[in-house]
Image: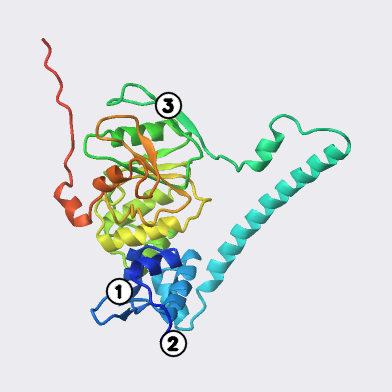
Amino acid sequence: MNSPAARFLNPAEAARRLGVSAKALRLYEQRGLLTPARTEAGWRSYGPGEMARGAEIAALRKLGLSLAQVARVLQGDAAGLEPALAAHQAMLEGRVRQLGDTMEKVRGLRAGLARGRAPAAGELARLLKPAEGLCIAFDLPWPWGGERFELRGIRSLNYIVGPLGSGKTRLAMRLAETIPGAAFLGLDRTASPGAALAPAVAEALAWLVEDGATASGALAALLAGLAAEGPSALVVDLVEQGLDPATQQALIAHLRRRGPGGRPLFMLTRSCVILDLAAVGDDESIILCPANHSPPTLVAPYPGAAGYEAVASCLATPEVRARTEGVIAWRPRREAA
């Protein structure tokens, strides 16, 4: 039983302490995983007990468990933990190998110093600076003026946002053309209801449905494109196309679970469910295409950051997005004189 002096937190404070978004807390509540207390005025309030349970849920989600699997673990069925822990162990072992390689380099540098040899130019910088990852550069297409655009250290999840007519689709297509081995997944993705699904797609679809998604041809086709072998990176046009809010919520949680080792994914979006600015992680980036056709820019997901308000103004709920579905901004051609 909570002591009278125990501090109770509001949803924003609780979400910040747990490292999740307020939307995630509401989702946990909707699925019956977490039941916050209520103040006399009816506001949600999270005490020590709720925070401890919330921390367990957040940890299980970070291990890659679906909400249905989380519920079973909390009820005492730990069968779903084995594959999740095995994957986590593999990730940790990879980090250990990287750390071992770095330690060997340090030993080599120290041995060289003991023999009177100073580090060669750049050795210390390469040792202390993390790997930058994939970097690309190209000249921007119309509606820009051919300005040079560079992306360094491309993240696992990359959101492309901008108002209608900002050129974000052209930017996405140029990214797909420029990144070696990348593929572009357009809006013409469909799957017949009775189509046989590859095992990986069927597994992902079942996982998402457990997490509250609605099975549909649009979702199956999207998952098939995401699971396609071969492309080094994927660029997806309006990732939320044809997906209801619950499905979008489950999908973005699924994509985040790939971790930093996943191949780069660029997603055009105008959905505040897909791009929840409060939930953007360290291995995610936001690319804004401004309305005035200034060059695209990276935007930090923090209020007050340059471009943050512009990004927020481009995002909307799925209900609002439905009003403009299929609308295309275009520039009329001038008639010849």
Outermost residue toward the bottom in this view:
1
| Residues marked 2 and 1 touching at CB (< 8 Å) | no
Indicate the amino acid at tag 2: Ser
Look at 41% across and 59% down and name the residue there: 254
Q: What residue sits right under mark 1 in the picture?
A: 30
| Label 3 environment density (alpha carbons within 10 Å; few <14, some 14–19, many ≥20) | some
Q: Quadrant of the N terminus?
A: bottom left
- Tell me how the rendering is colored: rainbow
Q: Which label sits in the foreground, 3 or 2? A: 2
Quarter of the figure that contains the C terminus: top left
Q: CA distance from mark 3 to mark 2?
A: 61 Å
The answer to which quarter of the image holds residue 274 is: bottom left
Q: Mark 1: which amino acid?
A: Gln
Is the residue 295 above or below the residue 5 in the image? Answer: above
Horizontal and vertical percent for residue 223?
37, 54
Residue 58 image position (x, y, % from top left): 45, 69
Q: Earlier in the sequence, mark 3 or mark 2?
A: 2
Q: Which residue is mark 3?
A: 138
- Nearer-the-camera pick, 45 or 224: 45
Identify the element where label 3 is drawn: strand
Q: Which residue shows up at 39% across the image and 73% down it?
A: 68
Q: Is residue 31 visible?
A: no
**Residue underneath mark 2:** 3
**Identity of the amino acid at label 3?**
Phe
Cβ atoms under marks 3 and 2 closer than 8 Å: no
Q: Residue most toward the front?
A: 5
